[in-house]
Image: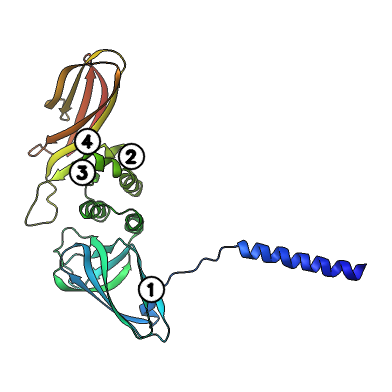
Amino acid sequence: MKTIFFPFLLLLAIIVFSSLSSDKKVEVKKLGIEDAINKGLIRAVVKGKGGHGGECINLNIISIASVDTTIYVEAGRRLNSEDSTIQDILVVKEIPIFVKAGEEKNINIYGFCCQASNHSPSTNEKFDIGHMADSGLVKLAQFLSKNPFEDGIMQNAVWVISDNHPLSSVGSSDASKRKELRKLHNILATIKHLPIDFSWYSLTFKSDTARLFSGVPDSLYGDIEYSIWKNSSVSLTLSDSIGHVVKRFFSNKPQNPEKYTYEIKTSVFGYPKGKYFVRLFANDQMKLEKTVEL
């Protein structure tokens, strides 16, 4: 009996062990382009295609390995311009590149400027393969790789982290697009350690031929959501920091008990810098206040 029982237990142990082993996930480390170069698997030449955003970089890869290889250009990699007056480019789309042994490939890299005060790269501007950016830019780039937006919105989002541009610069004059931006606002607020409520409004800025970002607010856009609990006379205003009303959106408007959304679209060009307040009054009592910073 013992001779039968022992092999049975051994077989059972092997089955259980095999089952546990098969359930265990094995993490396969991706081969990044910097590692591939350092290990002597490839040579790479990085050049600008002209411009500072979108598919603005060309990557030439030559395999010097004896085997076929898949190499990744990681979202969050910062490509360094050789000229210190030219903008570095942050890669925002991860790209897997399969190269056969001895093969040469040209690949377009998707990224955006992360040095707003520098000059835009020209065609054939030289870059090196750079390094992974700081944690905030890497987190944003990896988010954009999975959640793409229009180029202008992604560029402004990068500048919020890389150049400390105002969070309100990431927005749209289109109300439906502003709703789509909430996830992006949340990730930017998390990186910048800011309250989520900042994202209720957005600004557009004056164009400046001498620089990419003028920093001069042009127009204010936003959506005010509110509820009226009884028949009321309602007013909505924009006031400066000392309480002067600089804009009346509507005054003493009769409204029934209901939920409302009012879309703000107004010029703020020429307004002094500082804090402003959108205030909602019902029967002359303030019911809601939202902060705007120009």
Residue 88: which quarter of the image?
bottom left
Q: Earlier in the sequence, mark 1 or mark 2?
A: 1
Identify the element where label 2 is drawn: helix
Give the vertical position of 1 relative to 193 (above or below): below
What residue do we see at 32% from left, 69% from top?
A: 131
Q: Are marks 1 and 2 in contact (CB under 8 Å)?
A: no
Percent coordinates x, y for residue 68 in the rendering: 41, 81
The answer to whether residue 180 is left or right of residue 209 is right
Percent coordinates x, y for residue 6 in the rendering: 85, 68
What residue do we see at 38% from left, 73% from top?
A: 71
Between the C-alphas of marks 3 and 2, the distance is: 17 Å
Residue underneath mark 2: 196
Q: Earlier in the sequence, mark 1 or mark 3?
A: 1
Between the C-alphas of marks 4 and 3, the distance is: 9 Å
Query: Residue 222 got which mark?
Result: 4
The three-letter code of the residue at mark 4 reads Gly
Q: Are marks 1 and 4 in contact (CB under 8 Å)?
A: no
What residue do we see at 14% from left, 53% from top?
A: 213
Between the C-alphas of marks 1 and 3, the distance is: 36 Å
The answer to whether residue 53 is left or right of residue 185 is left
Q: Earlier in the sequence, mark 4 or mark 3?
A: 3
